[in-house]
Image: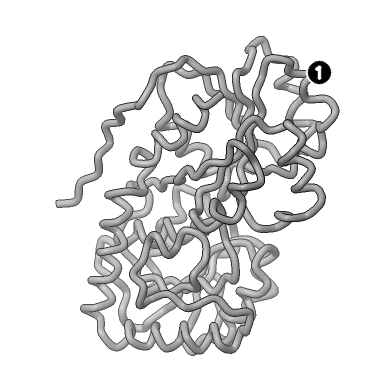
Amino acid sequence: MEESNETINYWRGLDLNIAILPDVKSWATGAMARGLVSTLPKDWTIDTRFTTKSAGSKMLPLRNSEIEYDVIYTYFWRWGRKFFDDFKTWFPNTKLMAGVASYSGVDTKLWKLLTSCGLYHGMNTWSKEMYEHCKGDHPRFEYTRHGIDHKIFTPAPDGRRVDPFIVGWCGNVTHSKKNAKVLRKLKFNVLVHGRHLDQIVGENVSRYTNVLLPYEEVGKFYHQVSALAIPSISETGPLMALEAASSGLPIVSTRCGIVPELIDEEWLVDETRDHDVIAREINKRLHILQGDHTLAYKVGMENRARILESWTHEACANDWVRFFEST
């Protein structure tokens, strides 16, 4: 019987007032923020602001709040450019902390400015790959795993889909145009869910639904596919890797983001910018899984076991407690 340690023994117990600024509520960082908040210490005051407004607009209600925040955390380090000159005036006693969610913009002039000017008290990322790349750029740069809700993302109740063999992908095509090129070259039917899918749907690629599902229902998508393919050249996550692994799916992926921490070496494709090579290597591994249903099930359940051991929200909570309490 599956078990996950849902009793959190917090390493310390400071009382903190925190404002967390994710993106829209229904998608990746919004879902990540809600899961994170659910496992932080109950004696902390946590204000989560879900909005698509600009960074400056997000700050306005915080400035009018009666709460004096110890920490304001944004999932997007670039937001700092919007209030670079004003933050300490607005919040003289508050520490600003930021996450690094992708390689986009890293190593640019803006990155070098915001990581060296003292605006951010701390920065973090949830990928060892990203941590190793960025840790020397900021004096308090930390690796904090981001968990997944293993109760939303569960194995299919009626067993894994094996006939027909369908490959899944989930995400935002606007941010993953190179993924689209590889997915169209896979020799399998591909089912996709996410945002801006018009530029990828066609030929072997079909859309799971015409509307973006509430995050609590995204787990149903993974019940309709046999395996997940991740052809990204670079990632911090991706979140779909956690979702698919928690759903008991085998994953074939490039060596990006957190994926090498989640799956066995034999299902990883070495990084290359050649789409034909990535597609060929992913196809090769998917054919193995298609031809051996017992193996595919075994690999998927091993992925699920890793999630329950190390990647639930509860298992990752103390990474974030340490990060926030470093203030």
Spot occupied by residue 317 in the image (x, y as percentages of width and height): 40, 35
Q: Which residue is most to the left?
A: 1
Q: Nearer the viewer, residue 103 or 251?
A: 103
Total marks shown come to 1
- The quadrant the C terminus occupies is top right
Question: Which residue is at a point 49% across and 70% down the rendered structure image?
Answer: 255
Spot occupied by residue 107 in the image (x, y as percentages of width and height): 73, 55
Q: Which residue is most to the top?
A: 66
Question: Which residue is at a point 32% across and 74% down the rendered structure image?
Answer: 161
Q: Residues within 10 Å of mark 1 (few under 14, many from 20)?
A: few
| Direction from residue 120 to residue 262 in the image, left or right | left
Q: Nearer the viewer, residue 196 or 232?
A: 232
Dot 1 lies on which element? Answer: helix
| Direction from residue 160 to residue 120 in the image, left or right | right
Image color mode: one colour
Q: Is residue 57 above or below residue 217?
A: above
Spot occupied by residue 154 in the image (x, y as percentages of width and height): 32, 55
Three-letter amino acid code at the position of disc 1: Thr
Q: Is residue 135 above or below residue 205?
A: above
| Direction from residue 9 to residue 64 in the image, left or right | right
Spot occupied by residue 70 in the image (x, y as percentages of width and height): 60, 18
**Location of mark 1 (residue):** 89
- Tell me which corner region of the image, top left, top right, bottom left or bottom right, holds residue 198: bottom right
Question: Which residue is at a point 39% across and 60% down the rendered structure image?
Answer: 261
| Direction from residue 89 to residue 294 in the image, left or right | left
Q: Is residue 73 above or below residue 93?
A: below
Q: Is residue 240 above or below residue 76?
A: below
